[in-house]
């Protein structure tokens, strides 16, 4: 009995000793591992800190690199696009030598009251600036290329030197200059019964000091300006509310009335920002920035009236070859104004240029963004009739602009008429009748809806 108890006690002691030994072993192992654990923790923290440091350093370097590149590109683009001082120096040099003259010459070159402000140029050859002339704000445009003849296909290139202004030549009489103007206008707008009236308007603009006489310097300035579509359109549509007034000129530099709000819809953003904005978000931003619907309707009526002015107008037909928002703006009263008329070209000159253009496919017969004809594969020449009339292009530009936010009681009818307008073709026999009908229906529908509002 005693031996059994004793054996049990011994066995229990052995067990306790073994448990203690295991505990001690674990304790020793824990103590031996604890320095390594303490060492590993700072290493992990240091490694994570180093990784974050390198990550932020990399992105900081990338941001600096991209920012520097954008600044460099913007500066390079600015110095290439914005050369107003070159244009001014060339013009004023000719003025001081008595080669050219105009209503803006003295203010630009002697009094310094015509000031070139913010650069708005989109091409090196076409210098555009906002500016001021005394108390008036205007847009100053100077063409840095020499136009020898009317060529729709030619791309404008920066000229190496100022225009020579060598026409008309010394000794040319006023009557001879009138004949030059008549011949040039006939080539541009076609042979019309009222061509003499258009020539009289041009000669009236040429008489800068309004003394009833046209000097050789004044004639040379007028001749240089007459090569430009925008100047011709300003003369043809002077007095019409949708064309900015021509305020003055000197050589081929001219000052137009400033349009307060441009483009027609949307907001202008730097190209570097444009790259990162999705198309859907961009359209939403443009719609958000547009005026209220009644005001949009009034602006749209203005564009439709402009189409009327240039379609079989007093001095011939003109083709709108780039009907985009960038080419138009509006005033505080929401009256539409043409901002850029370079791509509004006389139909007669367009047809003559297309008649001489060789082609293999229809895509060879395009001028601007919106004027295209078809290719006659039997002759490999472009046909002369445009595929889409001006009204169809205008309706295409206005569709989303007008339908968004349109009143529910006219939205369905408005959409129907806009799509009928967009479907107009230029080669159909009934085109002119359909053109007039759809134009009148659209104007009536819009005007009826806003005529009772203060926006009208």
Image (spheres, rainbow, N blue to C red):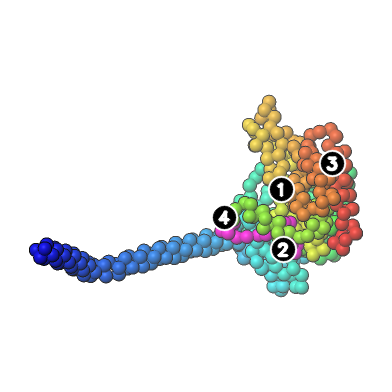
Q: Label 3, on which residue? A: 435
Closer to the camera: disc 4 or disc 3? 4
Q: Residue at x 69, y 43 (%)?
A: 367
Circle 1 or circle 3, nearest the eye: 3
Instruction: Say which residue label 4 marks.
Output: 275
Specify the quadrant of the image occupied by residue 213. bottom right
The answer to which of marks 4 and 3 sits earlier in the sequence is 4
- For label 1, the crowd category at 10 Å Cα-Cα, with few meaning under 14, some 14 to 19 and many 20 or more, is many
Element type where label 1 sits in the image: loop
Magenta residues span 259-275
> How far is the residue under mark 1 from the one under mark 3?
19 Å
Q: Residue at x 46, y 65 (%)?
A: 64
Please state which of residues 213 and 272 is positioned toward the viewer in this rendering: 272
Q: How far, Cα to Cα, is label 4 from label 1?
A: 23 Å
Residue 11 located left or right of residue 77? left
Q: Which residue is mark 2?
A: 139
Mark 3 or mark 2, which is nearer the start of the sequence?
2
């Amino acid at each position: 009995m005693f031996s059994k108890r004793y054996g049990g006690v011994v066995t229990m002691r052995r067990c306790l000793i073994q448990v203690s030994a295991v505990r001690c072993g674990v304790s020793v192992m824990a103590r031996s591992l604890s320095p390594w654990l303490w060492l590993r923790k700072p290493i992990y923290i240091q490694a994570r800190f180093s990784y974050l440091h390198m990550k932020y350093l990399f992105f900081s370097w990338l941001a600096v690199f991209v920012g520097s590149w954008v600044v460099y590109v913007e500066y390079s683009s600015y110095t290439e696009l914005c050369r107003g001082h070159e244009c001014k120096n060339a013009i004023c040099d000719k003025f001081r030598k008595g080669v050219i003259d105009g209503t803006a010459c003295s203010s630009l070159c002697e009094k310094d009251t015509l000031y070139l402000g913010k650069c708005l140029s989109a091409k090196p050859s076409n210098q555009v600036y906002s500016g001021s002339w005394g108390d008036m704000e205007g847009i100053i445009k100077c063409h840095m290329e020499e136009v020898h003849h009317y060529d729709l296909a030619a791309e404008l290139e920066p000229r190496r030197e100022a225009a020579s202004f060598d026409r008309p030549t010394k000794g040319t009489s006023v009557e001879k200059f009138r004949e030059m103007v008549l011949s040039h206008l006939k080539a541009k707008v076609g042979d019309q019964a009222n061509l003499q009236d258009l020539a009289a308007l041009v000669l009236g603009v040429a008489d800068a000091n309004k003394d009833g006489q046209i000097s050789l310097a004044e004639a040379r300035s007028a001749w240089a300006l007459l090569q430009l579509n925008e100047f011709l359109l300003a003369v043809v549509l002077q007095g019409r509310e949708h064309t900015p007034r021509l305020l003055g000129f000197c050589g081929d530099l001219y000052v137009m009335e400033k349009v307060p709000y441009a483009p027609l819809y949307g907001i202008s953003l730097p190209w570097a920002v444009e790259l990162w904005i999705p198309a859907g978000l961009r359209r939403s931003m443009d719609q958000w920035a547009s005026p209220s619907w009644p005001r949009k309707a009034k602006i749209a009526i203005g564009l439709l009236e402009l189409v009327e002015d240039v379609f079989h107008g007093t001095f011939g037909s003109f083709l709108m070859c780039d009907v985009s928002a960038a080419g138009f703006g509006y005033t505080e009263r929401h009256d539409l104004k043409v901002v850029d008329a370079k791509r509004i070209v006389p139909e007669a000159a367009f047809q003559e240029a297309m008649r001489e253009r060789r082609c293999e496919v229809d895509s060879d017969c395009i001028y601007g963004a919106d004027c295209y004809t078809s290719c006659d594969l039997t002759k490999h020449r472009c046909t002369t009739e445009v595929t889409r009339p001006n009204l169809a292009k205008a309706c295409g530009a206005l569709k989303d602009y007008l339908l968004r936010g349109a009143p529910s009681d006219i939205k369905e009818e408005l959409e129907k008429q806009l799509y009928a307008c967009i479907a107009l073709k230029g080669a159909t026999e009934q085109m002119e009748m359909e053109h007039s009908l759809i134009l009148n229906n659209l104007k009536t529908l819009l005007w009826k809806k806003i005529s009772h509002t203060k926006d009208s």
